[in-house]
Image: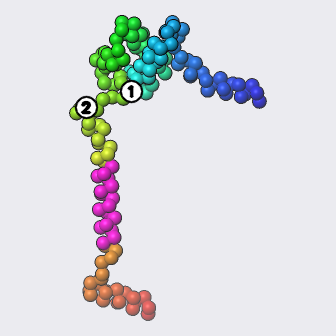
Amino acid sequence: MMRTLIACLALLLAPVALAAPSPDEVYADAAMERRARALYTQLRCVVCQSQSIDESNASLAEDMRIVVRERLAAGDSDAEILAYMQARYGDYVLMLPPLQANTLALWGLPFFLLFVGAGLIIVYVRRQARGMDAALTPEEEAELAELMDEEGQ
């Protein structure tokens, strides 16, 4: 039982251990290391697409981490490093891409479709309710009376 628990725990922690930076990627200065790790979490691995370069084990993510460290060593600010990576890889590299005119449709389209869908549902339900409340015309009442008389016989 204990071996099973240890094996399960090892399997759960394996991705965390694998995602950790290699010893040659760690700064001796704790403040610089925190700064580098904060930048890693803001940049997307363009190979993995859903992971930051901090979490990714792809070789491109490792190269991106090296570039970030080189830029930090050169004295660039965080904004300059993010701008450099954005210029090099495009807006997609940022985990939180900027809201721009060309991406406005992508951000707004889901909300637009939600409102259009809700409006169509409301119109449909109201039309159905109106159809149920309509009174019978005299011709329809006469036809209904005939049918009920036939059933009663």
- The residues bearing labels 2 and 1 have C-alpha atoms spaced at a distance of 15 Å
Q: Nearer the viewer, residue 111 or 121?
A: 111
* Total labels drawn: 2
Depicted 68 relative to depicted 97: above or below? above
Quarter of the image containing the C terminus?
A: bottom left
The picture places residue 104, in percent across and down from the top left corner, at 26, 36
Give the position of the N terminus as an image quadrant.
top right
Q: Residue furthest left?
A: 101
Query: For numbered disc 1, what is the local secondary structure?
Result: loop
Residue 143 on the magenta span: no
Mark 1, residue position: 95
Amino acid type at image mark 2: Gln
Figure quadrant of residue 127: bottom left
Q: Tell me if residue 16 comes above or below residue 128 in the rendering.
A: above
Residue 128 in the image, given as x and y percentages of width and height: 33, 68
Q: Residue at x 30, y 51 (%)?
A: 115
Query: What's under tag 1, amino acid-wise?
Result: Met
Magenta stretch, residue numbers: 114-130
Residue matched to label 2: 100
Q: Which mark is residue 113?
A: none
List x then y, in percent, for residue 18.
Answer: 55, 17
